[in-house]
Image (cartoon, grey):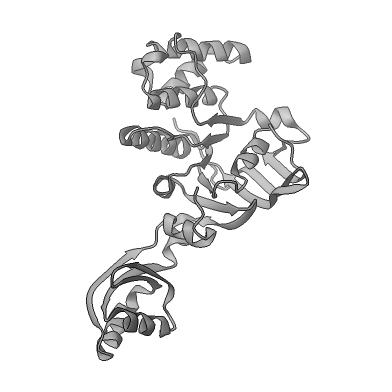
Amino acid sequence: MQPKINKDETILSVKKLGKKIGGRDIVRNLSFEVRAGEIFGFLGPNGAGKTTTIRMLVGLASPSEGSIHIAGYDLQKDFMKAISHVGCIVENPELYPYLTGLENLELFARMTGIPDERIFKAVEQVELTDRINDLVRTYSLGMKQRLGIAQALLHQPKLLILDEPTNGLDPAGIRDMRSFVRQLAREEGIGIFISSHILHEIQNLCDRVAIIQNGQLLQIGPIDQLTGVHSLVEWKLEPFEEGLLLLQSLPYIAKVLQTGNSKVTVQMPLDKIAETNHYLLKHDIRVSEISPRRQTLEDLFFDITGGFGL
């Protein structure tokens, strides 16, 4: 029987979080929430404050200001109760290669007083039952990632924090990771906080995203809402310079970017394509290609961060 999921339950609440290191603001006034059964993406360029934020979420660094509540418990004031609801895996998990997968989990379970039945439940959750008795050194990277997540799930956390979980995985491994992360959220009701530099994976996987830069929140919301506001249309024009000037003069055209010889990509409503084409033809501009597409998370990310890399 599947657990009843209260999607209005806030698992992680971050309010006005700040962190100073050496007198410099690394994270400033950061606020967001993660709800039960939600997959929440956390994005930002290199140096944006992502790692520092994650360190504060798991108690490895103390905030200079603001608060973190996990499952209703204040992480600063009631650390043990708050952190007991958190599972975390950061990039490649630390495992003993000459032990089996099961022995790795049993070792961790003994240290934390977790019963054997939880081990087998966690193994089922990450779909490793067929290989759990094999040595970890024989595992693929994707299987090691899943074993690491099984370890993080042993104590039945309400919040799972994943930092670069698909790092180094091949396409099949990424697909498998995406599948069971969804399953953990949808079927188990776990709130999942995920940081990754693979933007199309975040777009495929997450319900909502937050984008930060210089330690500050730039944008937050459902992916469909954030990427669906604008559409992009590529135009191939001749003569190009005259056509470009005409496009820029239209009030509904935004964010003009030259994308090749005689080509320009603009942000515009899709229902204005025919009108725009007619306008250009009327002014003796030959239009040989029109290529509309929906804005992606990658488009949005580079747009609002000014092109800084992850």
- Residue at point 50% right, 15% down? 105
Residue 262 x, y percent position in the rendering: 28, 73
Question: Which quarter of the rendering shows the N terminus?
Answer: top left
Considering only vertical position in the picture, is 68 above or below 300? above
Residue 71 visible in the displayed image: no
Q: Is residue 70 above or below residue 222?
A: above
Is residue 96 or residue 261 the one in the foreground? Answer: 261
Q: How many labels does the image show?
A: 0
Front one among 187 and 173: 173
Q: For the view shown, which residue lies furthest in the left direction?
A: 288
Q: Residue 167, image x and y in percent?
A: 44, 34
| Residue 281 in which image quadrant | bottom left
Residue positioned 49% across, 13% down in the render: 96
Q: Where is residue 191 in the image (x, y as percent from the top left)?
A: 54, 39
Residue 52 lies left or right of residue 134; in this view the side is: right
Instruction: Name the quadrant containing residue 157.
Output: top right
Instruction: Tell me residue 53's x, y (percent).
Output: 64, 42
Q: Tell me if 110 is positioned left or right of 231 in this view.
A: right
Q: Can residue 160 be seen in this view?
A: yes
Identify which residue, 86 or 264, lies in the foreground.
264
User: Is 256 left or right of 11, judged from the image as shown?
Assistant: left
The residue under the point 47% across, 49% down is 207
